[in-house]
Amino acid sequence: MSSLSKSDARRRSYGLAVSILRKLKGEFFQANGLPGHLWVSRENNWDKITRELGKTDGNTGRFSPYTEPSQFDDADEMKMEAAADILSLYLWAAKNNPDFEKIRAQHSLPDPERVAEYLGVGDLRDKYN
């Protein structure tokens, strides 16, 4: 991982944030909507952060990014900050939500250590930890 450039780590961080939202938005865990169930107790305005990155289909609840990860320019600071915030909430949930591992397994979510590495190499702020 250390061979990854800062720019590559930032683009991968954006891609991970989009992937997490795509996998979780519109899904439920024990009758609670995801990803809110994971991190609403830490940040109740989490959905506002997701709106910086994309839109949610009103019928299905599925997430679609405004910018696909393959087209993302890490110079877009607003989107980069929102992606870092999503990943920070993800890391917070990994430490604080007792249902995290069950949800992670059910939805094939990334290893929190990898997420933390990308934030670090990308010099991105881990706002919630």
Image: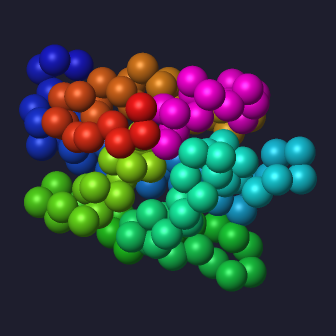
Q: Determine the image quadrant of residue 80.
A: bottom left
**Magenta segment main secondary structure:** helix
Magenta stretch: includes residue 91: yes
Q: Position of residue 6 (x, y in %)?
A: 11, 36
**Residue 92 to residue 14: above or below:** above
Residue 5 place in picture, x, y as percent: 10, 32
Residue at (51, 39) in percent of width and height: 90
- Colouring mode (rainbow / by chain / secondary structure / one colour): rainbow
Extreme residue in the right direction: 31
Splitting the image into 4 quarters, where does residue 54 fall? bottom left
Q: In this image, 59 relative to 12: left or right?
A: right
On the rendered image, what quadrant is the N terminus found in? top left
Q: What residue is rendered at 68% in x and 31% in y?
A: 97
Queried whether the magenta region covers residue 33, the answer comes back as no
Q: Residue at x 71, y 62 (%)?
A: 26
The residue segment tinted magenta is 89-103
- Which quarter of the rendering shows the C terminus? top left
What is the total number of numbered labels drawn onto the structure image?
A: 0
The quarter of the displayed image where residue 116 is located = top left
Q: Is residue 116 left or right of residue 23?
A: left
Residue 22 visible? no
**Residue 102 showing in the rendered view:** yes
Residue 43: percent from left, percent from top: 55, 52
Q: Nearer the viewer, residue 26 or 49?
A: 49
Q: Is residue 24 left or right of residue 125?
A: right
Name the spot of residue 96 as percent of width and height, x first: 62, 28
